[in-house]
Amino acid sequence: MEERLQKVLAGAGVGSRRRCEDIIAAGRVAVNGQIITELGTKADPQRDAITVDGKPIGPPADKVYVLLNKPRGYTSTRSDPHAEKTVMELVKSIDAFLYPVGRLDVDTAGLLILTNDGEFTKLMSHPSHRVEKTYVAVVRGRIKSADMHVLEDGVELEDGITAPARTRLLAYSAKDNTSTVEVVIREGRKRQVRRMFSTVGYHVLSLMRTKIGKLDLTNLREGDSRLLTKREVSDLRKTADRSPANSAISRRNG
Ligand code: URA
């Protein structure tokens, strides 16, 4: 089947689609002996001889899906010259061209998926699919239930009002004067949870993502990773497919 050249290259594990576009534009890719620099060009990996720097590309790489319990302090990127540490260091032993599905802030811990499957990444990250993500935030002060309702209904951020969310108070520590709050959102805007709390007057002291869909971090210690099972991947796909763009999230009672 003919596909865009950057997709074929990415599928063979040459790099991310973006990186493959750069490789094509740099004139390093040939199809049937002819150098191609046009990004829209299509090729059929079964039929055409495709090379990068004169070397034939391999067969399509097996798809790999990794669940990582990210510690704080690691940047969710394949490479960033400014990052002290990246999540890639934690999955070094896995032999695949992985990249993170979405991002967790450097100071956020918890559940991060990495994969070499571009379609899956797109499916999970696209705002219209609205996959549920669960976070546990420790905020300074005793949170008022009225403020939790405001968060649930949607708050105005610089990039627009947030979609309905669910919140649940997990604990209040009088000793530390902190509240531990679970928040379920279906969006993935930059520093969204921190900004939501800040809008209603609370500073987030720590933030952890505990779930995506129904996938959680059971038995996975901080810094550890494991492969997702076929079942887990198909459940995540189903969750994304099922989530209609404008479905209202069910609200917390009371
Ligand atoms: N919301 C945040 O504020 N940070 C994250 O890393 C994820 C969601």
Image (tube, rainbow, N blue to C red):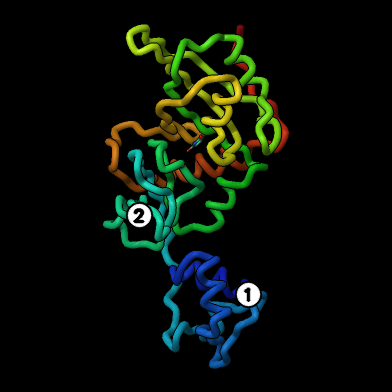
Residue occupying image coordinates x 41% and y 33%: 216
| Residue occupying image coordinates x 56% and y 86% | 31
Q: Is residue 5 visible?
A: yes
Q: Residue 132 or 45: which is nearer the viewer? A: 132
In which quadrant will I find the N terminus? bottom right
Residue 66 image point, x, y percent: 38, 49
| Rendering quarter of residue 56 | bottom left
Occupied quadrant, residue 189? top right
Q: For the point 34% across and 13% down, which residue is it?
A: 176
In the picture shown, does residue 177 fall above or below 67? Answer: above
Count residues near mark 1 (Cα–Cα under 10 Å), then give few for <14, some for 14-19, many for 20+.
Answer: few
> Element type at marker 2?
helix
Place of residue 202 in the rendered image (x, y in percent of width and height, measured from the top left):
51, 20
Q: How far apart are the alpha carbons under marks 2 and 1?
A: 32 Å
Looking at the rendered structure, the kind of residue marked 1 is Glu
Rendering quarter of residue 36:
bottom right
Kind of element beneath mark 1: loop
Where residue 39 appears, as percent x and y from the top left, is: 64, 76
Task: Give, as a three-letter code, the residue at label 2.
Answer: Met
The earlier-in-sequence mark between 2 and 1 is 1
Locate residue 54, reporting x and y percent. 44, 89
Instruction: Please tell me which residue is depicted at 52% across the width and 33% down the height of the picture.
Output: 133
For label 2, the residue is: 88
* 169 on left or right of 153: left
- When the figure is inspected, residue 236 is found, relative to residue 181, above or below; the finding is below
Q: Which residue is mark 1?
A: 2
